[in-house]
Amino acid sequence: MNITERIKSFIEPNKKIRTAETAVLFLLRAGILFSFITGLSQLNRKPGDIRSLGSIEMVRDRQREDYDEDYTVCDVIYTNGEDSLTVSYSYEEYEQLQSDSITAYGYETSDGTRLFFPQSDPSLQQITATYRNVQAEKMMPVFNLGNALIILVLSVAIVTLFSTFFTTYEKVWFVSIMVLATIFAVLFPEESANGVNGVVIMLLYLLDTFLNILCELLISKQSRYNFLVSVLVEITEIVICIVLMYRFATMVTTLFFWLPIDILSYINWTRHLDDNEDELTMVRRLKGWQELLVLAGIAVWTLVVGYFLSGLDIRTDFFNTKSLETAVIYIDACASAVGVANGLFIFFRLREQWIAWYACALLEAIINVISGQYVLLILKLGYFTNTTYGYIKWSRYIKSHREEKPSLF
């Protein structure tokens, strides 16, 4: 039975979606329209009548600055209570900047929005552009909600169309993780980084969460189709690394290891289908001494790759200090090493890949906390819960098929 026939077999019993599921999808779509209509209408509002607030002194926030000669534009933030002003300097101007304060000139729009400028007579064009930027920041949770609901609609649609393929637990788990991701996307919006808007970054995070969760679920079901989803996971994570200019060990590992191993793993899993259920792939486990060799290899990889990458002069405005950046580099090197071991375990259909998932999820969760990527912690929650589920399912299968002893290739 080919892929097209399998898809039809999953969809056929569910052509008529139940009333409750239709209602949920309708409400989610309505929420998407409401979010984007509200956000765009606010984004395109005119500032209206403008009145001067006079001048106030603002203090420079040096904690947000970490620039060197590689930067062409350096943003300096000045604050006074809840009011703030961002001034962009060239690196040469930034080097000459000595004062820790600035005189800011304030204006208030008809809706009460307070805008501040370094000059006393900004043009109407400058006021309108600044007002639009402020509105964009205010509407970020709304746009994040719209993007999150799009991913949530896709999640509900998948478990609905392929309802005979997933158990009730799997459906509830999958949708629950995506609902949590939606909530976190609204509560913890991402700031812009490296010239990329925070809404775009959040959309990448949500897409990464959705694809990873789906891939993990398919692995726990011993389905070879997880590798088709995994290719999309790798592409998304490469884009995230490029956008944020960080985690280069993971990016290189993804590009030169994970993408090829996904293709090879799909072929290897296809050769070892279960004799009774061709939706399942036969799986096995490692011996103790083999596990020790893997741990030694991970330790060596972490030290060598971490030392090499920490010596490179790669700058990003995603971290505030060099020490924090170096810590993330070594943790990332260890995570990439565990990831390589995990990829090999998956290729050989070994149960130990679930243990590697635990370690990798923990290391990546630490990076997410350091980086303030709170929405990605939902993905790690999904990893931990589904890893336990997958480990139990694989262990039961291995125990019931102990006499078969499937080969690695």
Image (cartoon, rainbow, N blue to C red):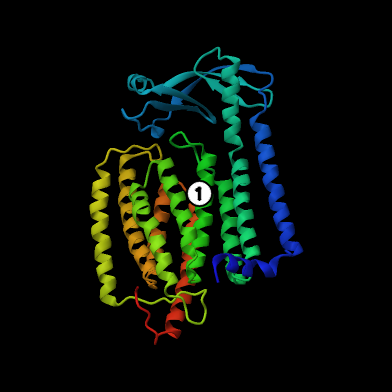
- Residue most extreme to the bottom: 403
62 sits to left or right of 108: left
Can you give x and y, in whole percent of width and height, for residue 138 in the image? 60, 35
Left or right, residue 170 beside residue 282: right
Residue 231 occupies which quadrant of the picture?
A: bottom left
Q: Residues within 10 Å of mark 1 (few under 14, many from 20)?
A: many
Instruction: Give the residue furthest to the right.
Output: 19
x and y, in percent, of residue 46 in the image: 67, 24
Classify mark 1: helix, strand or loop.
Answer: helix
Residue at 65 percent of width and 37 percent of height? 39
Image quadrant where one finds the N terminus: bottom right
Q: Is residue 257 above or below residue 348?
A: above
In this view, the residue in front, 94 or 53, is 94
Q: Quadrant of residue 178?
A: bottom right
Q: Is any atom of residue 381 visible in this view?
A: no
Residue 41: x and y in percent read 68, 33
Q: Is any atom of residue 259 visible in this view?
A: yes
Q: 68 or 72: which is nearer to us?
A: 72
Which residue is disc 1 drawn over?
205
Residue for point 32% across, 48% down: 329
**From the viewer's perspective, is 72 left or right of 57?**
left
Above or below, 141 relative to 3 = above
Q: x%, y% of residue 51?
A: 65, 17
Kind of residue at disc 1: Tyr
Question: Measured along the vertical axis of the image, is residue 29 above or below residue 70?
Answer: below
